[in-house]
Image: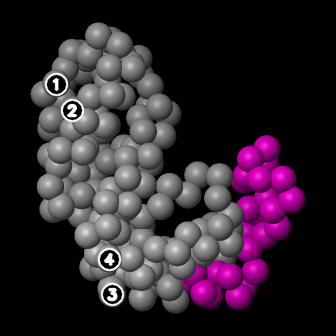
Amino acid sequence: MNLNEFNSIPESELLEVLNTCCTSGAWQKKVVAARPYPSIDELYSRQEEIWKGLSKEDYLEAFDGHPKIGDVSSLKKKYAHTKALASGEQSGVDSASDKTIQELAELNTIYENRFGYIFIVCATGKSALEMLEILKSRIDNDPEEELKISAGEQAKITKIRMEKLL
């Protein structure tokens, strides 16, 4: 999709497309309402501003759109070929060990029980071990601070998805 298509696509279709980038309905509606965008940079900038102005409930709605990282079998599948997936970004990264996968699953469950939502991190280019270290570093955060961090991570994810879209 190019910027002209983004600006002219019917609202209902664009809402569906934006849902693949971020599942916050408020974010989607505000991004659509701010059309037309004079440039892609303006679109990226405006969607980030919109994100920052949303409520906790809107952030939680977006977080709910992510699959839960807590199932050991899905984690093993996700990180089976970490080195190949991250080629050029992480030289020398090996596949995730069973121990790392198990610990990541366990800490994800503890995190969700503590904060009330799944662990949100921009995983692009990160190995399972890196994800585990990030999770360990955040699990004891103050809930308000953790929400801010998670919202920031969601913003990174959304931007990457928007860039792929356009």
For the C terminus, give its image quadrant: top left
Q: Amino acid at mark 3?
A: Asn
Q: Which residue is mark 2?
A: 31
Q: Which residue is mark 4?
A: 142
Q: Which residue is mark 1?
A: 34
> Magenta segment, which residues?
80-105
Label ID, residue 113: 3
Indicate the secondary structure of the residue bearing disc 4. Answer: loop
Indicate the secondary structure of the residue bearing disc 3. Answer: helix
Disc 1 crowd rating (10 Å Cα; few below 14, some 14-19, many 20+) is few
Disc 2 crowd rating (10 Å Cα; few below 14, some 14-19, many 20+) is many
Q: Amino acid at mark 1?
A: Ala
- Judge from the rendering whether residue 33 lies leftward or rightward of residue 129; answer left or right: left
The foreground one among 96 and 142 is: 142
For the N terminus, give its image quadrant: top left
Mark sitting earlier along the chain (2/3): 2
Residue 70 vs 144, above or below: the answer is below
Disc 3 crowd rating (10 Å Cα; few below 14, some 14-19, many 20+) is few
Disc 4 crowd rating (10 Å Cα; few below 14, some 14-19, many 20+) is few
